[in-house]
């Protein structure tokens, strides 16, 4: 059995461990995640990362942009797997990073950290392909997903989740009381936290076209922020062509960290740096291939029209 240090070095080069080593990694990770509550309380400065979706080379580009632990503190908002071709390499690298730097790297759960979802959108098939049609690695990793925290709070001011709010959620105390060590249910607060989205065109809650969760308006956000004494909600889950989106005067911010998502979009990606004064800076980066081909230090952002009605098919 190779050591965590050896396995970490391997994954830096996208070399996969054996099945037994994956089991070892996941057991070590579960031991750590078991000590973290449903909501983790963190301090600035910290860098917040949105969806990765199996884009391993772009994850490496992200670290070139934002720095690597332990020099940079990271909070990842979920959706590490599916869609992209190297979900295994992404989740194994991040899990080893968590094991190596448990107080510098924090991972939240997204809607794709669920058997029901990642069996359909690529991760299950990737595990079978890369491990000789064995389902074991997929099962080990999904068991670890059940232990991921659901939310984070930074300096008691920034509330961080993968998706959005729930009509059943009034206070963060409602999250603390959830039984999280299970697959994500189809409805309820836990499902809504990873599936829901804000919408500028509505008030209150409406059922989401995604088939799970809700869409919700500014009045919902205002009430939640007031009750819990937060300043902003920071989330991921929705493709942003510029790498991020700021709604309702900054009361809710979306961070997207998968450039040229699925190879179908010409979007940029970002990570959000939060300093000691809770000032927020968006560090924009392009995909690894484009970055490698740049002839100057200045990165050019290119955007194209995006049809929001198609968004649900790519999340």
Image (cartoon, rainbow, N blue to C red):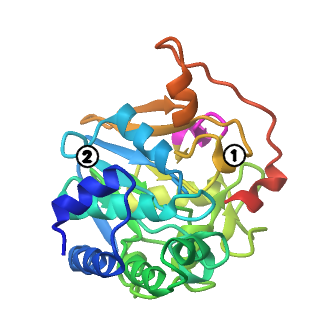
The reply to whether the magenta stretch includes residue 220 is no
Tag 1 secondary structure? helix
**Residue hosting label 1:** 263
Q: Quadrant of residue 268?
A: top right
* Depth order, front residue of 220/149: 149
Screen quadrant of the N terminus: bottom left
Q: Quadrant of residue 142?
A: bottom left
| x, y percent for residue 133 | 55, 83
Residue at the far top: name it.
296
Cα separation, mark 2 vs mark 1, equals 29 Å
Residue 22 vertical placement versus 11 (above, below): below
| x, y percent for residue 163 | 56, 62
**Residue hosting label 2:** 73
Residue 315 vertical placement versus 139 (above, below): above
Which residue sits at x=55%, y=78%?
128
Q: How many marks?
A: 2
Q: Which residues are magenta?
A: 241-250
């Amino acid at each position: 059995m190779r050591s965590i240090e050896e396995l970490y070095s391997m994954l830096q080069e996208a070399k996969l461990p054996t099945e037994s080593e994956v089991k070892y990694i996941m057991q070590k990770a579960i031991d750590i995640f078991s000590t973290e509550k449903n909501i983790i309380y963190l301090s600035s400065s910290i860098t917040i990362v949105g969806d990765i979706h199996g884009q391993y080379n772009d994850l490496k580009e992200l670290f070139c942009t934002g720095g690597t632990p332990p020099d940079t503190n990271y909070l990842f908002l979920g959706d590490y797997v599916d869609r992209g071709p190297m979900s295994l390499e992404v989740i194994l690298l991040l899990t080893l990073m968590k094991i190596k730097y448990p107080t510098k790297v924090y991972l939240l759960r997204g809607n794709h950290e669920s058997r029901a979802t990642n069996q359909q959108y690529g991760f299950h098939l990737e595990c079978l392909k890369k491990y000789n049609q064995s389902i074991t690695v997929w099962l080990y990793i999904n068991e670890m997903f059940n232990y991921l925290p659901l939310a984070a709070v930074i300096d008691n001011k920034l509330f961080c989740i993968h998706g959005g709010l729930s009509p059943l959620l009034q206070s963060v105390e409602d999250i603390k009381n959830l039984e999280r060590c299970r697959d994500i249910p189809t409805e309820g607060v836990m499902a809504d936290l990873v599936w829901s989205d804000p919408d500028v065109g509505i008030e209150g809650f409406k059922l989401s076209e995604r088939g799970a969760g809700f869409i919700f308006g500014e009045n919902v956000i205002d009430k939640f922020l007031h009750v819990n004494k937060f300043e902003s909600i920071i989330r991921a889950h929705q493709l942003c062509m510029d790498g991020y989106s700021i709604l309702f005067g900054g009361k809710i911010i979306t961070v997207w960290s998968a450039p040229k998502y699925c190879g179908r979009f010409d979007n940029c990606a970002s990570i959000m740096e939060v300093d000691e004064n809770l000032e927020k800076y968006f560090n924009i980066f392009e995909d690894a291939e484009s970055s490698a081909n740049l002839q100057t230090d200045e990165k050019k952002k290119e955007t194209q029209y995006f049809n929001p009605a198609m968004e649900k098919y790519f999340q």
